């Protein structure tokens, strides 16, 4: 083989490897992100079914592809070891793209992810929606949060403190003992 043909083959191989690496690091069609520190993200339908069988709450990360703060939550918060532990203990994690036309089933209704996000009252991103194991609403939290504050929210909801005290009461009771 001549050197020109060898050079072309090398360039083609390098482009192929680069494209493969790029596609592995991007989100798949359901919004699952390999950069989220080992969190097992689920689609809405799978997450609801799993939450029922495991008797865990749902954490729904409502995001858009263009949202910089959503990407920061993925890279800085969801990769935090304490966050991963709290999520695994008490929640089934769901990614929901607020601009997606992928269909989901809510009760007996079929709607797309964008319509579901609107039905949950989401208008800014990221928004974290918390549901009980039967997919009933608990609360939603709009905006980006640092890992330490997010861990406090996860404990407040995951450990059922929300049932008998306000978030401010809970925060004052845990004080400086909250891990990040």
Image (spheres, helix red, strand yellow):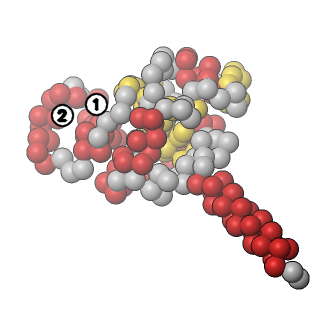
Q: If the image is split into quadrants, where does the N terminus sit?
A: bottom right
**Residue 48, quarter of picture:** top right
Q: Residues within 10 Å of mark 1 (few under 14, many from 20)?
A: some
Q: What residue is disc 1 on?
A: 162
Pinpoint residue 62: horizontal percent, then vertical percent: 50, 31
Residue 170, labelled with which disc? 2
Residue 168 image offset from top left, x and y in percent: 17, 27
Q: Secondary structure at mark 2?
A: helix
Task: Name the residue at 63% across, 55% down.
Answer: 22
Front in this rendered view, residue 21 or 175: 21
Does residue 96 appear left or right of residue 101 in this picture? left
Instruction: Farthest residue to the right: give it.
Output: 1
Helix or strand or loop: what does disc 1 sit on? helix
Q: Residue at x 65, y 29 (%)?
A: 100
Residue 39 visible to an observer of this rendering: no
Determine the CA span between mark 2 and mark 1: 8 Å
Q: Is residue 170 left or right of residue 163?
A: left
């Amino acid at each position: 083989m001549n050197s020109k043909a060898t050079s072309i083959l090398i360039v083609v191989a390098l482009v192929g490897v680069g494209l493969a690496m790029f596609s592995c690091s991007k989100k798949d069609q359901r919004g699952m992100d390999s950069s989220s520190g080992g969190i097992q993200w689920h689609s809405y339908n799978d997450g609801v079914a799993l939450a029922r069988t495991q008797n865990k709450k749902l954490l729904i990360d409502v995001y858009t592809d263009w949202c910089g703060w959503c990407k920061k939550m993925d890279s800085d918060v969801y990769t935090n070891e304490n966050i991963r532990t709290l999520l695994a203990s008490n929640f089934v994690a769901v990614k929901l793209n607020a601009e997606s036309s992928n269909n989901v089933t809510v009760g007996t209704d079929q709607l797309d992810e964008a319509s579901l996000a609107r039905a949950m009252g989401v208008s800014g991103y990221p928004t974290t929606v918390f549901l009980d194991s039967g997919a009933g609403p608990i609360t939603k939290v709009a905006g980006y949060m640092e890992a330490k504050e997010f861990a406090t929210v996860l404990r407040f909801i995951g450990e059922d403190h929300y049932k008998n005290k306000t978030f401010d009461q809970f925060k004052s009771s845990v004080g400086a003992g909250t891990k990040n």
